[in-house]
Amino acid sequence: MSLAVVRIRGKGDLRHEVKDTLRMLHLTRQNHCTILPGDKTFRGMLRLVKDHVTWGEIDPEILAKLLLRRGRAVGDRPIDDAFVKANSRFKSIWDLSQAIAKGEASLRDVANLRPLLRLPPPRKGFRGIKRGYNDGGDLGYRGTAINDLLRRMIPEE
């Protein structure tokens, strides 16, 4: 099981530990998204930065759409099935997203693929960036509801 993590809050006045952890997670700016394995180490890191990010379990369909529309290779080139097939053991973006969602692979298994996805703000905005998800805001753990947020952040073409 893999987790999608989206940074919601900006850079203003962060503690040193929080700033370092966000940098280690590749979440350097607002609306950046990264895909992490759901192991104990990363959950501890997420607990430290819970006041700046939201996360939850990602579906393979949403992950495939994200990679197809917002995935970038080194040099800011868009990726497609041919890129994934040439630079990894997977045959397509769909196969890669299935393996990542199950926790059998990561974005690092594809050579020259950037470890983060730069997303636009969600359509109809956030509910609140200063409160937790269970308190009517957007921060913290949200389970499978992360897929609804990511669906609103995927640009329509």
Image (cartoon, rainbow, N blue to C red):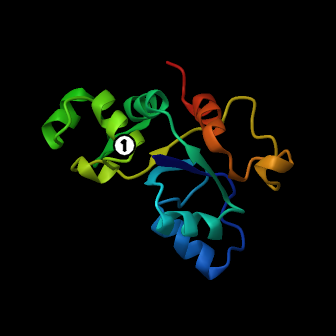
User: At which x and y percent is residue 70?
Assistant: 43, 36
User: At which x and y percent is residue 137?
Assistant: 81, 47
Q: Quadrant of residue 64?
A: top left
SS label for mark 1: helix
> Outermost residue, top direction?
157
Query: Would you name the residue on which mark 1 appears?
Result: 100
User: At which x and y percent is residue 86?
Assistant: 13, 37
Q: Quadrant of residue 125?
A: top right
Q: Is residue 111 left or right of residue 28?
A: left
> Outermost residue, bottom direction?
16
Instruction: Give whichever of 107, 117 is nearer the camera.
Output: 107
Q: Is residue 131 left or right of residue 82?
A: right
Residue at the spot 38% in from the left edge and 53% down from the top edge: 115
Residue at the spot 28% in from the left edge and 49% down from the top edge: 74
Label 1: how many residues lie within 10 Å, few (<14), some (14-19) or many (20+)?
many
User: At which x and y percent is residue 68?
Assistant: 38, 29
Q: Which amino acid type corresponds to the residue marked 1 in the rendered image?
A: Ile
Residue at the spot 81% in from the left edge and 48% down from the top edge: 134
Is residue 94 depicted above or below 142 in this figure?
Answer: above
Count of marks placed on residues = 1
> Outermost residue, left direction?
86
Residue at the spot 53% in from the left edge and 61% down from the top edge: 28
Is residue 93 depicted above or below 23 in this figure?
Answer: above
Q: Quadrant of residue 85?
A: top left
Is residue 9 depicted above or below 57 in this figure?
Answer: below
